[in-house]
Amino acid sequence: MVLVHLVLTFCSLLYVTGQFEKPLNKYIRHYEGLSYDTEALHNSHQRAKRALSPQDRTVQLDFHAHGRLVY
């Protein structure tokens, strides 16, 4: 049973394609689009440009990838 599951998983991975139904190149078969709040990023960038201290000059980008939120 485990062998059958592994074979089916391997076979399905061979046919995985990217976001637009075609591989990106011969090494990358699957990829997802990046989604993030562009307005929040722009506001954070503007604030970082005006910051006086080095600690406040950082910009944090939170985005969704592979079904989860990445910080």
Image (cartoon, rainbow, N blue to C red):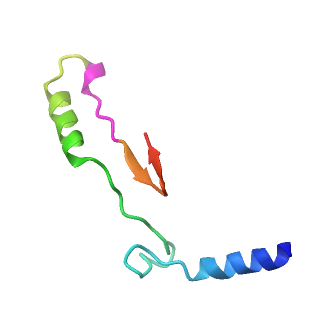
Q: Residue at the location (84% across, 72% down)?
A: 2
Q: Residue at the location (37% across, 78% down)?
A: 20
| Residue 9 picture quarter | bottom right
| Residue 46 picture quarter | top left
Q: Residue at the location (31% across, 50% down)?
A: 36
Q: Is residue 34 above or below residue 47?
A: below
| Residue 31 picture quarter | bottom left
The picture places residue 70, in percent across and down from the top left corner, at 45, 44
Q: Is residue 22 above or below residue 19?
A: below
The picture places residue 23, in percent across and down from the top left corner, at 44, 79
Q: Is residue 26 above or below residue 48?
A: below
- Residue furthest toward the right? 1
The picture places residue 15, in percent across and down from the top left corner, at 56, 83
Q: Residue at the location (81% across, 79% down)?
A: 4
Q: Quadrant of the N terminus?
A: bottom right
12 left or right, relative to 46:
right
Q: Quadrant of the C terminus?
A: top left
12 left or right, relative to 63:
right
48 left or right, relative to 7:
left
| Magenta stretch contains residue 55 | yes
Query: Magenta residues, as a range?
Result: 54-61
| Magenta stretch contains residue 50 | no
The picture places residue 21, in percent across and down from the top left corner, at 41, 81
